[in-house]
Image: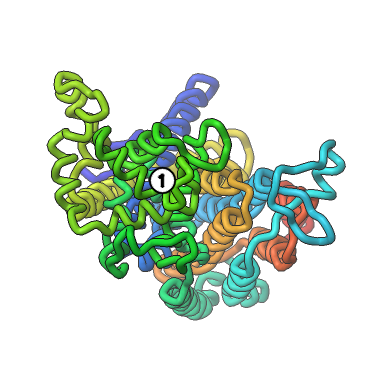
Amino acid sequence: MGLSDLFIDAKDLPEGGYGFCQLLFLLAAYGYILFQASNLISDGSELLLLVPSLAGLVGSCVLPVLGAVPDGAIVLFSGMGPDAQEQLSVGVGALAGSTIMLLTVPWFLSVYAGSVDIEDGECVYRKPKVSGMKAVFWDMGVQPTADVRYGAQIMMLTSLSYLLIQVPAGYLHGPEEEIAKGEKKWALAAMLVCIIAFVSYLVYQYIAAQKADEDSSLNLKVDAVVVERIQKGEISLLGALNSVIHLAAPETASEATPLKDETPLEKRLKAILKPFFHKYDTDHNASLERSELGVVMSDLGMHVSADDLNKRFERYDIDSDGSVSFHEFVQGTADMLREEDVQTFIKANSRGEGEAANGVATAEEDEEEEEMPEEFVSLPPDVQQRRILMRAFYMMGLGTGLVLVFSDPMVDVLSELGNRINVTPFYVSFVLAPLASNASELLASYNYALKKTSKSITISLTALEGAGSMNNTFCLGIFMVLIYTQGLAWEFTAETIAILFAQFAVGLIALAPVQRVWHAAVVLAIYPVSLILVSALEAIGFD
């Protein structure tokens, strides 16, 4: 019995409304599973960013590849069944839908969410003053870093891979068998180009990550993940920055002055600690009182006793004015993390002394023993790192396994749904497949943009451009393998034109140093325009 025998054949479902309801149920079930699998892959790979020795490799290579796995699986299985030539349109729809949806809908949402006032052609990152929809569209926008412009150029360049198969396909006519035979050598050439472009892109990303400074998109993303995981209680501040601490030169608090140059550790801490500082600065006076400092340290996974808090407050308060400014908070935390007895501090914390100092009873601790976050943050940093690796690989493995198992039946359901509603499976897959495979990327880009900084909008938009580049190399390369090995015909001229149109339209807009909200509205319009373009081209005779 093969794996396919475990699933209901969509073609065997009864005709009529009853069978159609069953088909919709399968679509929802498989879609939900693929959505969760995509989240597992995304969350698991992001966890690896918390391992400093792997962060550069993960951020530059692993994240882009794993993000493309769900789409790649749908593409793969669309060309492997007995009706491969017919179902190949499902794979093309998934590829086109994923590429165009990610470059339009989340792009608009990110720019809109991250928009600020524009004055004299420059974005002013403060609380917006403009009001009214007209003012928002014309006088607000974002100003990402140059990384977005570089990403747009790479995306447009890699999209040219489509021409290696599309141009020859435009000159071939006749039965599908003859067309497939004529396209075979061109598919091989396109496959090799995709492989070269894929490897080159990853090498470029990795080299760029090694040369990146603290303001690079990769480091900004790593810091954002660190903040998120600390807030969830999955890692302590010490566990996240353990390797950075060891690389930092030992320095005592007595040597610290407000005017000294920032160390690499303090530069990282500024980005990580800022949201915690503002969260607990309840009176909004840009400083922390003694009680507020204790709450922040507890939230960062660094529980201290009342006596120890008093001593630490004195060390944090460098200018002795009775409160801790953000600069003092960063500097004091860096000094604390560099202490020689920090391992003793963590071991004491792991025995529950930190919880006891904060009024947590032993009985309550026993009741919550199964909650991983409370247990996880109290572990020594090296143990935290090992647990992170184990959990990350488990999540990525489970997510990838689910994708590989459920992509095949999902392709069958999408194809059958198109047949039953008399719509080409391409359109069904174009609209529905990205909802399952790319929803997490949409939400992630939007959430980053909400921070309304040039750095956060850069993370959002470069991730979307990277997804486009991966579809142009990784996913298209899978297509070319199918065309070459399965003897299939590439008959997707209209779809290819729409994909190229969307990528170049978005890419050219992304080259602008400042993007206004109305630019993003134009980008959003590209999504329905692309569908209309495919329909119009097919109506006038393009395949």
Q: Is residue 179 visible?
A: yes
Q: Quadrant of residue 265?
A: bottom left
Who's the residue at 63% across and 57% down the image?
454
Is residue 224 rendered to the left or right of residue 137? left
Who's the residue at 28% across and 50% down the image?
392
Who's the residue at 41% across and 56% down the image?
331
Q: Observer-nearest residue: 477 or 143?
A: 143
* The furthest residue to the right: 134
Quarter of the figure that contains the C terminus: bottom right
Check disc 1 and report its element: helix, strand or loop: helix
Q: Quadrant of residue 428?
A: top right
Q: Position of residue 396 (x, y in %)?
A: 31, 50
Q: Position of residue 474 (x, y in %)?
A: 46, 66
Q: Position of residue 124 (x, y in %)?
A: 73, 54
Q: Is residue 409 above or below residue 492?
A: above
Q: Amino acid at mark 1?
A: Ser
Q: Position of residue 78 (x, y in %)?
A: 45, 53
Q: Is residue 435 above or below residue 471?
A: above
Who's the residue at 70% across and 55% down the image?
142
Is residue 368 rendered to the left or right of residue 87? left
Q: Which residue is mark 1?
A: 38
